Image: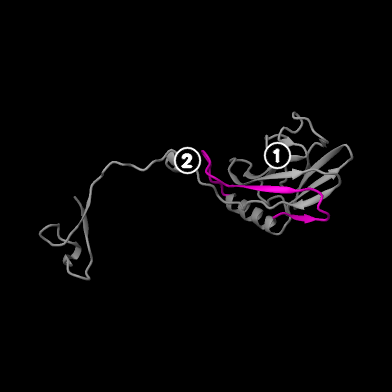
Amino acid sequence: MIRIIGALLFAVVAFGRDAHAQFNCTNSPQDETIIEYFNEIDFEDLIEIIVTDTGKAYGVTLSCPARVNADFPPSDFDLMMTTAANTMPISCDGGSETFNYVPSPPTASELPSCNWPNCNFFITLKNKTTGTVYSQTETQITFPGGNSTFLPELNPATLPICNNTINGCIVDGTCSLSTEKLGNLTLCESSTSCLPPPNNNGYGYNENNYYQPS
């Protein structure tokens, strides 16, 4: 669901791509603050995308709250919007920034992620120094005539799983169940067939059951 300010002048479809497993990601002391700040301003609807129609082109602006001070949000907070082809980046680390104006209609080289009037964009929150991605949302905008402002529904920010800390086959999806028999488990029913149980509790009814490999 997309919340619109003013008239419904263009359609938006959001595709979820939240923070996922990444290679060689590095923890930063700013991670927690960046994540909490982003989730708060997103919850309070303080992140906006503004489209300005000049008649022959569109300006696309990413707007977020002005910085509280020089230290907050953290210097590594980087909220960026790009085309789905990773072109025309604009960042919003406190204030607003506008794309170069998008011609109507654009050529493939000017906006390669468009099937006019539908264009795809990525909105990504990352750490400017470490490159760690906390949130990413793919959004499709349909450009009719007129100006409009909307509040994108963004995926929440989370600290991603670092690929260098988990089994590689989990990352690339090649893990498979083993068919090799590693052994059987045998229910120990008496002290003559198994090793003595812990604390010599015995094997009677309603007592603990113990298993050992065979």
Q: Amino acid at mark 2?
A: Val
Residue 208: quarter of image:
bottom left
* Residue 32: x %, y % from top left: 58, 53
Q: Which numbered disc covers residue 171?
A: 2
* Residue 87: x %, y % from top left: 71, 34
**Residue 25 part of the magenta-drawn span:** yes
Q: Is residue 186 left or right of residue 132?
A: left
Q: Are marks 2 and 1 in contact (CB under 8 Å)?
A: no
The image shows residue 128, relative to residue 150, as above or below, that is: above
Chief secondary structure of the magenta span? loop
Q: Which numbered disc covers residue 82?
A: 1
Direction top: furthest residue: 109
Q: Nearer the viewer, residue 7 or 73?
A: 7
The residue shown at (42%, 41%) is 167
**Residue 134 part of the magenta-drawn span:** no
Mark nearer the N terminus (2 vs 1): 1
The image shows residue 159, relative to residue 200, as above or below, that is: above
The residue shown at (82%, 41%) is 59
Q: How is the image coloured?
A: one colour
Q: Which numbered disc covers residue 56?
A: none
